[in-house]
Amino acid sequence: MSNISDKKLREVVKFYKNNTEQKTLGVFNLTNETLHRYLRKAQKKGIDTFNKNSVLEKISERFTDKELEAIASGGRILPGIEKIPIIHFEGERIRFTLSGDLHLGSLYTNPDYIYSMYDESRKAGSEFIAVGGDVTEGMSNRPGHIYELSHLGYDEQKKHAKEILGQWDKDMYLIDGNHDRWFIKSSGAHIVKDICNALGDRFTFLGHDEGDISLKGKSTIKLWHGEDGNSYAISYRVQKIIESLTGGTKPGILSCHHVHKFNYIFERHIHAISPGCIQRQTKWMRGKRIPAHTGFVICDAWVNDSGISKVNLCWHPFYS
């Protein structure tokens, strides 16, 4: 085999790089000396092949076991792009809870509403809770805002949020909203991310203002917050958000937050849900003649190879 062809040489080198040396010697009936002569010859000729084992070893060094599982299932783990956790479940149906605009640290937020949401979610069998931003009230520069706070400052609001959110015993996925980002603007503190890190693996920070959750790698739930305002028609804002999404980025379910409204529409094959809020109507909202739909949504989604085949949702309102 001294006059080995380039084709055969490439075959030997490729096998060697993706298997053990001992296995290569046995499969090609080579001596150790001959194999290394072939490797030197391939190097001189510039013959190289993809080293799967080497690449996989480098990947395993960069990511956690949970992230590696997500990669294997089709999850997005790319630099500069938020990671997408993948939810695995038996059968086609999964049940989960959508909530948001908790505003923990506000005098207008009753923690009992959140505990009630936990109880109803447990009874219903929700697999996880997704929270679409404004987890904390934050501290704005609006005159008089400080007098609307039950907990003053980053440390106190973080401690309060940890205590309340930590009562949930399954997975929770969260994004931040404009109120949370007051701490970023004032001091560079990422309060929602810090809360998730403090509470452990069950709590996942998905990103700033928006974040995605993959259902079996077949479809996506997108949480969306935004910094725009209420529209005259409740559905108009949701429709404009849907219009802004390009084809390749459309989720199966869009959970819209920020304006404290409950609504459901189906547009461009997207199930768009506004799951209300936990914070009651504030004096500022009442002065602007803006109502608050206080409550949360428990949603069933059926997922097949084509994506979301159908949804069924139940609105749980609170009456102050």
Image (cartoon, helix red, strand yellow):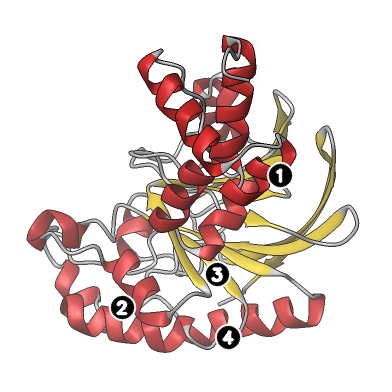
The answer to whether residue 86 of the structure is visible from this angle is: yes
Q: Which residue is mark 2?
A: 105
- Closest to the observer, 90 or 131: 90
Q: How many numbered dots are placed on residues in this image?
A: 4
Q: Residues within 10 Å of mark 4 (few under 14, many from 20)?
A: some
Amino acid type, callout 3: Met
Mark 3 or 4 closer to N-term? 4
**Residue occupying the point 24% across, 56% down:** 181
| Front-lying residue, 175 or 285 | 175
SS for tag 3? Answer: strand
The tag on residue 26 is 1
- Alpha-carbon distance for marks 3 and 4? 14 Å
Vertical side of 124 occupied by 38: above or below: above
The CA span between labels 1 and 2 is 68 Å
Which of labels 3 and 4 is toward the front?
3
Badge 3 density bin: few <14, some 14–19, many ≥20, Cα 10 Å: many
Dot 3 or dot 2, earlier in sequence: 2
Distance Cα–Cα, label 4 vs label 1: 64 Å
